[in-house]
């Protein structure tokens, strides 16, 4: 065999051997990577759960491992937050949460069992959203003004409004609406948006306050009606629905947020790895479209940006809660 041919065969054999070794190393790394779990503080079927499952499915590839969602419902997310605090700080446990558990609960609960600044480290933020006021299909009101008139027509102007969790921004909104429109509104707390929505669909409660993503599918299906949203402008997913600012209720323009957190003490290399994976997933067109269709405003936030957003939102609501006269329980 000519020496040139032997050289080519030898080079090809070396390349094939190196490729096989590289593939074996990659496979071994993927197989050795521990599964990642994303804690969610609300039941399956709600808005936060759906978002977590969407991201978990897409995070499998950049993280090179299985990613599962673990629902730890109860106490407005406190149980899931406490579980994150107790989890190993090794990058295998994350917490997907919106503003309620991170910014609001520490303001309204004396001993929540965790302090975000002390016990958590931000991984990435990925969206902001707005809360909305919706009426059930059995309520005759087609708009918020008609809802106010309908409640006033009931005995004593009394009405119950569902909220996904006690001592939450929806509860303070219900109180403010009652005071502003001289209604005797009672906030009825649920263990998440899914059971609240079930009662609204069954006409067991006339109205509810929750995030747009909790309501949007049933609103578009004509089963409930979103009659007003918070925030400074109308939502792209609900262009026909006015803001409370348009209706004359000011002070709720600051937008809540969604973020992902890890236990404090998680090594920086793990945080960087997770942050990069979230950034990659949030940039996917199909992910952005789905989140937008659910009524979120998609916007990636670095750990530093998420921390800044959290602090600013907490300061705004600290003033609102203090002014309301609410005493931490």
Image (spheres, helix red, strand yellow):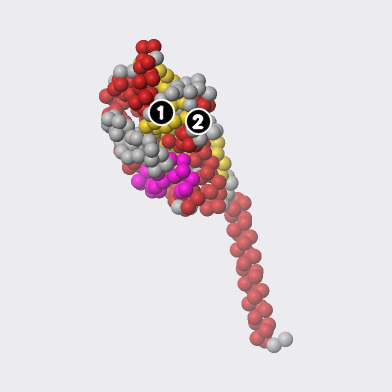
Crowding around mark 2 (Cα neighbors within 10 Å: few <14, some 14 to 19, many 20+) is some
The region drawn magenta spans: 288-306
Give the residue number, with chain letter if any, for mark 1. 142
Q: Residue furthest bottom?
A: 2
**Residue 4 seen in the current view:** yes
Residue 127, percent from left and from top: 41, 43
Q: Secondary structure at mark 2?
A: loop
**The N terminus, quarter of image:** bottom right
Residue 295 magenta: yes
Q: Nearer the viewer, mark 2 or mark 1?
A: 1
Crowding around mark 1 (Cα neighbors within 10 Å: few <14, some 14 to 19, many 20+) is some
Q: Is residue 249 left or right of residue 68?
A: left
Residue 223 image label = 2
* Along the line of sight, the residue nearer the viewer: 129 or 324: 129
Q: Residue furthest top?
A: 155
* Along the line of sight, the residue nearer the viewer: 218 or 290: 218
Q: Is residue 214 left or right of residue 145?
A: right
Up/down of 169 relative to 311, above or below: above
**The C terminus, quarter of image:** top left
Up/down of 305 relative to 116, above or below: below
Please tell me in which quadrant of the rendered image residue 133 appears.
top left
Residue 57 magenta: no
**Residue 328 seen in the current view:** no
* Along the line of sight, the residue nearer the viewer: 188 or 311: 188
**Earlier residue among tags 2 and 1:** 1
Look at 35% across and 46% down and name the residue there: 305
Residue 228, percent from left and from top: 37, 32
């Amino acid at each position: 065999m000519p020496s040139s041919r032997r050289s080519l065969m030898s080079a090809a054999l070396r390349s094939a051997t190196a490729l096989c070794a590289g593939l074996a190393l990659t496979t071994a790394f993927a197989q050795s990577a521990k599964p990642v779990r994303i804690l969610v503080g609300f039941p399956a079927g709600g808005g936060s759960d759906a978002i977590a499952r969407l991201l978990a499915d897409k995070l499998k590839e950049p993280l090179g491992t299985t990613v599962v969602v673990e629902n730890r419902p109860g106490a407005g997310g406190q149980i899931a937050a406490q579980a994150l605090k107790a989890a190993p700080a090794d990058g295998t446990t994350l917490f997907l949460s919106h503003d309620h558990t991170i910014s609001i609960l520490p303001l309204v609960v004396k001993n929540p069992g965790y302090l975000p600044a002390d016990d958590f480290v931000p991984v990435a933020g990925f969206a902001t959203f707005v809360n909305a006021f919706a009426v059930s299909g059995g309520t005759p009101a087609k708009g918020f003004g008609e809802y106010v008139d309908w409640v006033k027509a009931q005995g004593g102007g009394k009405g119950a409004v569902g909220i996904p969790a006690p001592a939450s921004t929806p509860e303070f909104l219900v109180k403010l609406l009652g005071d502003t429109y001289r209604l005797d509104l009672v906030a009825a707390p649920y263990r998440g948006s899914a059971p609240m929505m079930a009662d609204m669909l069954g006409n067991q409660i006339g109205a509810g306050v929750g995030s747009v993503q909790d309501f949007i599918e049933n609103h578009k299906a004509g089963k409930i009606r979103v009659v007003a949203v918070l925030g400074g402008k109308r939502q792209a997913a609900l262009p026909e629905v006015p803001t409370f600012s348009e209706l004359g209720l000011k002070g709720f323009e600051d937008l809540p947020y969604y973020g992902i957190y890890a236990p404090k003490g998680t090594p920086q290399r793990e945080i960087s790895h997770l942050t990069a994976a979230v950034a990659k997933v949030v940039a996917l067109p199909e992910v952005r479209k789905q989140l937008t269709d659910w009524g979120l405003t998609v916007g990636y936030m670095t750990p530093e940006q998420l921390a800044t957003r959290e602090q600013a939102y907490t300061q705004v609501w600290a003033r609102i809660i203090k002014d309301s006269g609410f005493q931490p329980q």
